Image (tube, rainbow, N blue to C red):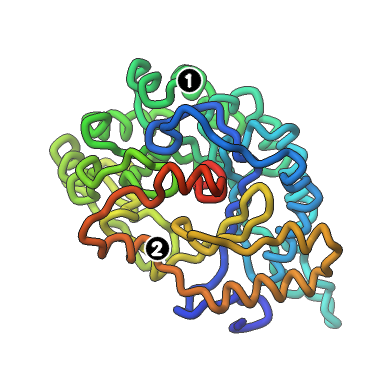
Amino acid sequence: MRNGSNSPLVDSFGRGLRSLRLSVTDRCNLRCQYCMPEEEYKWIERAEILRFEELVTLARIFISLGVDKLRLTGGEPLLRRDLPQLVAMLDSSLRPQQEMMSGNGSAGAPASGLRDLALTTNGLLLAAQARDLRQAGLDRITVSLDTLRADRFRALARYGALEDVLAGIRAARDAGFEGLKINSVVIRGFNEDELADMISFGRTVGAEVRFIEYMDVGGATHWSASQVVARAEILDRLRDRFGAIEPLNLEAQGAAPADRFRLAEGTTFGIISSTTAPFCAQCDRARLTPDGLFLLCLYAHRGLDLKHPLRAGASSDELRALITERWTTRRDRGAEERKTLRARGPLFQIDDLRRDVHLEMHTRGG
């Protein structure tokens, strides 16, 4: 149901659909141990991947239903050829347009539309594309960076070089991106001793760091609860280094996944505690896989195929009805349900992932 002309769709628990993650490819140029730890993977056939025009068509329908934030993900989205072209297409056709001048000559209220266009990347290819992405209309960039040590980077990711990621972060800053963020997955026994160093690095490059609890999502076949560093411990470790930490206004953060905090000298950072303190009750986001599967939750076992009706000639109204029916009956609370399990292990086993590529994290996007 809708609460008003420009209000989002509302699900069974009153959660509005405001944010859509568009995964533009399932390919990645890293093999991070917490996401892609196996040696071999199945991939979506190239012909099944949505074309740019199809992505824009579906994004326009979602925006007509109240979505105003889009995030391009993967896999690694910068592997998608000509990605700045897609950014330009989304920027030019989906932004809010001022309504017609009213009869007394004053401007009307802004129409609904895309208000935030963002990208999550591992940063390896960012240095070469940052300026083009900014000029195309991209608003914000989040870079995944889990360690500042080259040896640890190689051990975790198995490919690529830390210096290329750092160069990408600097290039994004130099290209004029504001609100730059760094996402860092914290894994016990690997990088929990780098929390303070990551905060300090973020300060030097003008980026807000967001620490992410290690999650048992699709692809995390080596996950165990013993490796999770919980929000409380992250805060304790940072207090030991920086002193008092102030929680920021949680109500003002709305459906944002990160709880935000401020150090005494003013530096802010976030913690995404989906494993130990899920935010399902406020979750306003959905996902679209590279081949058009509409997912209501990161932990979902199945989704709604939008590609086949789109390619079969379904009208915008027909596609809108499919999305509306699926979201308004949504009852997903995946992270909360996982937290209640007495014996908690990986979400999916290797055989499950090999049967269905849509269960993989690198297919559904973070």
Distance, label 2 to label 1, CA atoms, is: 31 Å
Toward the viewer: 271 or 353?
353
- The image shows residue 16, relative to residue 94, as above or below, that is below
* Marking on residue 36: none
Q: Position of residue 242 (x, y in %)?
A: 19, 38
Numbered disc total: 2
Pointer 2: residues within 10 angstroms few (<14), some, or many (20+)? some
Toward the viewer: 4 or 28?
28
Q: As drawn, is 298 to the left or to the right of 176?
A: left
Q: Position of residue 117 (x, y in %)?
A: 63, 50
Can residue 364 be seen here? The reply is no
Residue type beneath disc 1 = Tyr
Q: As drawn, is 10 to the left or to the right of 210?
A: right
Q: Earlier in the sequence, mark 2 or mark 1?
A: 1
> In this view, which residue lies farthest toward the left?
240
Q: Quadrant of residue 103?
A: bottom right
Q: Position of residue 251 (x, y in %)?
A: 36, 68
* Marking on residue 159: 1
Residue type beneath disc 2 = Gly
Residue at (39, 28) in percent of width and height:
204
Quarter of the picture containing the N terminus is: bottom right
Q: Which residue is mark 2?
A: 334
Pointer 1: residues within 10 angstroms few (<14), some, or many (20+)? few
